[in-house]
Structures are given as C-alpha cells and as structure tokens.
Amino acid sequence: MLRVDSTDPRSDARRPAELMTSLADHLSTGLVIVDPELTVQAWNRWMAEHAKLAPEEAIGRSLESLFPDLPAATLRRRVKAALQLRSPSYVHPRRGYLFPVPLDRVTESNFVYMQQRVRILPYQDEACRAIIVVDDVTATREAEARAAAAARASERYLELLDSNVMTLAVNASDGRVMRASSALLESTGWSAAAITGQSLQALGLGLLDALTEAADGTLPERPLRRANGKALWVRVRQARGLIEDEVGGERHLVIQDISLQKKIQTLSERDTLTGAYNRMKFDQLLQTALSAHERYGQCFSIALCDIDHFKRVNDEHGHLAGDAVLRQFAALLQAQTRASDALARWGGEEFVLLLPMTSVQAATTAAEKLRRAIVNDHWPVIDQLSASFGVAAHTPGESADALLDRADHALYQAKESGRNRVCTAEEPDTCPDRPRDGEHD
C-alpha cells in the first residue's frame, strides 16, 4: 500500500527505492515520507489504517492541510534539521501525539488519542525527502500515567499520615530520634530541629527494646515528654512490615495519644480531692495482692490511718481549710512511702496504705515514720496535726474483709489509747469484739 508520488519527474530514478520501501506496509509503525514543506510523498498501510486516510488521499497534499492542528512550524524545522545534519531528529508533541488517532479500546484509558513517539530520518542520501516514523507508545504512556497517579496518591497518603498520625523514626542502634511526623510535633510542641537527636529515654519512652507488646498483646504506655516538660500519655507500637536494613538502620514507632483515656481512668480510680486512690481502686489492688500471695507466697501488710480530731478542723476553720489539710496530708503520706506502696482515701479523713512485700514489723516501722512526719510537718491555719494508725499483716487464707477488720480494730485501739500512735493488729481469731463502722475522731 505504500505509495510514492509518481508525478515527481525524478520518480523513475526512484523505482528501486519504491520497491524497497514497499516493505514498510508490513511494519507495525507509521511511516510518512515528506519534502521540506511537509508535502506527503509516501504513506504506508499503518498510517492509512490509523489516520483513516488512504494513500491517494494523502499523497501530494501537505500534512498541514490534512491535519490543521498539526504543529507545522515545529515539524518543518525538525525536517530541515534532519536533512541538513543527515541525522535523526525527534519531535515531542506537547499533547502527546502528532497525528490525532482516536483510541478504540474496550478498556479504559487515560488518553483520548493514541500517544506517539515521532522520529524524523533523512531518506537515503537525498536532501529533499525525510521519513517521519510514528510509534504507538500509548501503553507505555498509560503505564507511566498510572505510576504517576499512584505516586501522587502515595504522596497524598503519606502527607495524610504525617499530618494525622504521630510517628517517630529512630536510630536502631542508639534509639535517638531521626525524624518526627508533623502530627507528633504539633501535639508535643517540639520543633523538628529540637526533637532530632533526642534519646527515647529523655523523651520519657524508655529503652527502644523495651517498647514491645506484652504476651497478652497489650502495648507499652509511656509519658511522652512535651517541649514544655509536661507529659502526654501515649501507647507505643513498633511499626510492622519494615525491614531494618531496607530503611538504613531505622525503626519506626507509631504513637497513640491516650491522655484522654488516662484522664478518664484517673477520674475513675482517684479521689478528686486528694489525688489518692479511691476505695474501689484499693479493693482491686488488695485483690491483686491476695492473688499474688496465693500464687507466689508474696507477703503484704496494710495500714489504716485516721486524722486525729479532724472534726475540730472543719468546725473551727471551715471546710475549705479541712480540704486543704486533707490534700496536704495525702501528699505527705505519698511522699513518705515507696513507689510500690498504694495510698487510698478510705473515707472522710481516713486513709489506707497497701504495703507489698512488707512484714508486720516493717509495716509498723513505716507507720511510725509516717506518724512522726505528720507531727513534725508545718500545717497552715492549724498549728499542729496528728494521726493514729492500725497495722495488720496478711496471714495465709485470710480474706480481704478479715484483714481490713483486723487493721480497723488496731486503729480503734490506737484511738482508744490516746491517739497519735501506731497499733499492730493481733493475729486472726484473737481480736475481742468492738464497735464496727464507728467514727474514729
């Protein structure tokens, strides 16, 4: 089907060339031979099928007249350059195609017209003819477009994560921060420069290797230090699916803000006035201690404590002064006990201490230390304050109620004996009857 213009007076000299170029009809690419003014000299089968123009319709006419939207000026320059330099020239159509060939496909495409790669070659040794080669690169451009769209979507997804998920990239060897997400910086007040290089320990998260799930699947909870020094309670997970070697020795931590949960938990567990545990929470801790004793044989003791003559404080100085005394009293007890001990407000001016791994002798000594600290402390508004203590050590098989009953009886004895003292409970089944649930004033 490839036709060469036979009206050209030089066409007889080109019969061998015409026979040779007839092979172009079997190519799966477009082939057009033009002169420097873009007049068509030859038009192969591929062009006829895709451009919907038979050779007799195209040959002898200019490409500009056949395709009015053709960038004719650019194409002429490229043709002349190829002929003058005797080397290939390339055209990169701004729209992605030179000849508008509509796509006729069942599958969806990003393009309306066939995407083309266009090369211009000098025709043999002639200075008056050039070959325009048109390759269909639609599949390649579609793949590139899909890859670009996927890259943009991935970038948007990463931006979304960065803005909404708190993450830390840390050095796998020393646990120092390498990068932090925008969400984490916003929540903590750190700047990117200030947090970079910080150790996890300095941030309150502890050692990197310790940030692993527990056997029951629970994640570690840590007080992440904000830029202003305050803590933001978070739950930490090491990101899965990342191979350390592939990310340059980094590990990635995903951090969840649980400060609201902690606040709700605190409200459910703590006495709102003093900050000590409430009675319900103490009951849970006591049951845990009983279970630990039953399973592992761990001893523990409790100490009930009651402020002496507290009613006078309220009567003489008012309830606001009484509240201030209760807060100071709880803070003193908390400061004078171990981190493993648990302090709870038992009711009114009465408090209770759970002392793990503590014998009755050690518990009595600890209570005596607290009693002296209370007496020696400075109490605004009131000149002096004292408290009475009842101490009891848990015995094998003893229930929580029985243990508390013995400690309460010892406290009653301290009150009856003149207050401002520590009394130790007797062994089970030796305590005489005494009033229950009375006021220890």
Image: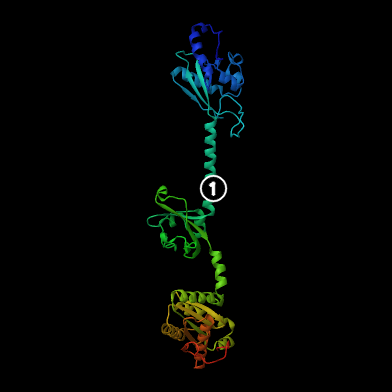
Q: Is residue 215 above or below residue 269?
A: above
Q: Which part of the image, by quadrant, shows the C terminus?
A: bottom right
At 52% from the left edge and 88% from the top edge, which residue is drawn? 409
At 52% from the left edge and 39% from the top edge, which residue is drawn? 148
Residue 348, image x, y percentages: 57, 82
Asked whether residue 32 is in view, the answer is: no
Q: Nearer the viewer, residue 430 or 85?
A: 430
Residue 142, image x, y percentages: 55, 34
Secondary structure of residue under mark 1: helix
Per the image, the residue denoted by label 1 is: 157
**Other-residue count near label 1 (Cα within 10 Å), few / some / many at <14 / 14–19 / ≥20:** few
Q: Nearer the viewer, residue 434 or 54?
A: 434
Residue 407, image x, y percentages: 50, 85
Q: Is residue 82 above or below residue 300?
A: above
Q: Give the farthest residue toward the bottom.
A: 417
Q: Is residue 194 above or below residue 411?
A: above
Tally of numbered discs = 1
Q: How is the image coloured?
A: rainbow
Residue 433, image x, y percentages: 54, 92
- Displayed quadrant of residue 175: bottom left
Q: Is residue 217 above or below residue 32?
A: below
- Displayed quadrant of residue 100: top right
Asked whether residue 320 is in view, the answer is: yes
Q: Which part of the image, by quadrant, shows the N terminus?
A: top right
Q: Amino acid at mark 1?
A: Tyr
